[in-house]
Image: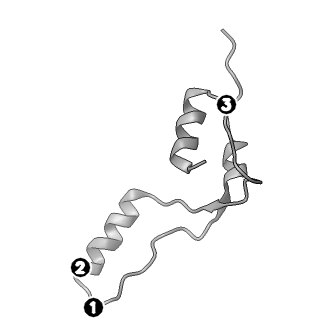
Amino acid sequence: MQSSKLDCHVLSGNDITLYGDGSPIRSFCYVSDVVDGLLELRITDLHPVISATGKKHPLLELAQLRPAPRSA
């Protein structure tokens, strides 16, 4: 499951389906950090770089962050 679909399912409280063993990884960063990096690249002679935190999270780990169901 893509992380964006995973986010939607977690936020809506729907069941989550992971394909495989959940080991594919994702790395996240703030949009503002990416924008800052892109603006910096515009004014320098640097070659494009990857903008990420370096912290890798397996999809299974993200799925386990799902909040507990709320009682009515």
> In terms of secondary structure, where does tag 2 sit?
helix
Q: Residues within 10 Å of mark 1 (few under 14, many from 20)?
A: few
Residue type at mark 1: give it: Asp
Residue drawn at x 26%, y 87% is 44
- The answer to the question of whether label 1 and label 3 lie on touching residues, with beta carbons closer than 8 A, is no
Closest to the observer: 61 or 44?
61
Residue situated furthest right in the rendering: 21
Q: Residues within 10 Å of mark 3 (few under 14, many from 20)?
A: few
- Tag of residue 9: none
Residue 63 position in % (x across, y down): 68, 43
Determine whether 29 is above or below 65 in the image: below
Residue 68 position in % (x across, y down): 71, 27
> In terms of secondary structure, where does tag 3 sit?
loop
Residue type at mark 3: give it: Asp
Q: Earlier in the sequence, mark 2 or mark 3?
A: 3
- The answer to the question of whether label 2 and label 3 lie on touching residues, with beta carbons closer than 8 A, is no
